[in-house]
Amino acid sequence: MSNPVNELASRQRPLTATAPVTASLAKNFTINGTLTMTNAPVTPVAGQPVHLEASVDNVNGVRISANKDTSSSGGYSFTGYISENETYYLQAHFDGTTTHATSVSTPITVTVT
């Protein structure tokens, strides 16, 4: 009999995210990344919802976007702006499915000046 926990772990989907290190106050900047399955071979995951969260303390994230579905290559892209000078920590989130674990990107630090 198979172990559902091990099966779910084998289908985890790493989520990457990138953004500029600095952004100009109230000017657009882009956050993008990919969603992939890690079991060999690494495979892009298409058509899955990803959203962004932001915090100023790298602890208490707040959702700042609607879901965007990943492209056929597993990619996603968000364009936004921030209207206050501050250092922000941004993370992309995939909430998972009944057969795939959730995934959160490593925090991206963006300083708005």
Image (cartoon, helix red, strand yellow):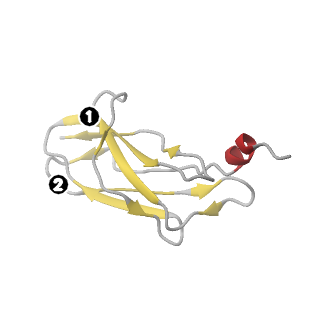
At 37% across and 27% down in the image, what residue appears?
59
Q: Residues within 10 Å of mark 2 (few under 14, many from 20)?
A: few
At 42% across and 51% down in the image, what residue appears?
18
Name the quarter where the C terminus is drawn.
top left
Q: Residues within 10 Å of mark 1 (few under 14, many from 20)?
A: some
Mark 2, secondary structure of its residue: loop
Of residues 19 and 8, the one nearer the viewer is 8
Mark 1, secondary structure of its residue: strand
- Which residue is the extreme one toward the bottom? 72
Dot 1 or dot 2, earlier in sequence: 2
The picture places residue 93, in percent across and down from the top left corner, at 44, 47
- The part of the image, by quadrant, that contains residue 89 is top left
Amino acid at pointer 1: Thr
87 lies left or right of 19: left
Decide: is 68 above or below 8.
below
Amino acid at pointer 2: Lys
Of residues 35 and 25, the one nearer the viewer is 35
| Disc number placed over residue 87 in the picture, else none | 1
The picture places residue 4, in percent across and down from the top left corner, at 73, 44
At 61% across and 52% down in the image, what residue appears?
100
Of residues 77 and 93, the one nearer the viewer is 93
| Disc number placed over residue 27 in the picture, else none | 2
- Which residue is the extreme one toward the front? 1
5 lies left or right of 107: right
C-alpha distance separating marks 1 and 2: 15 Å
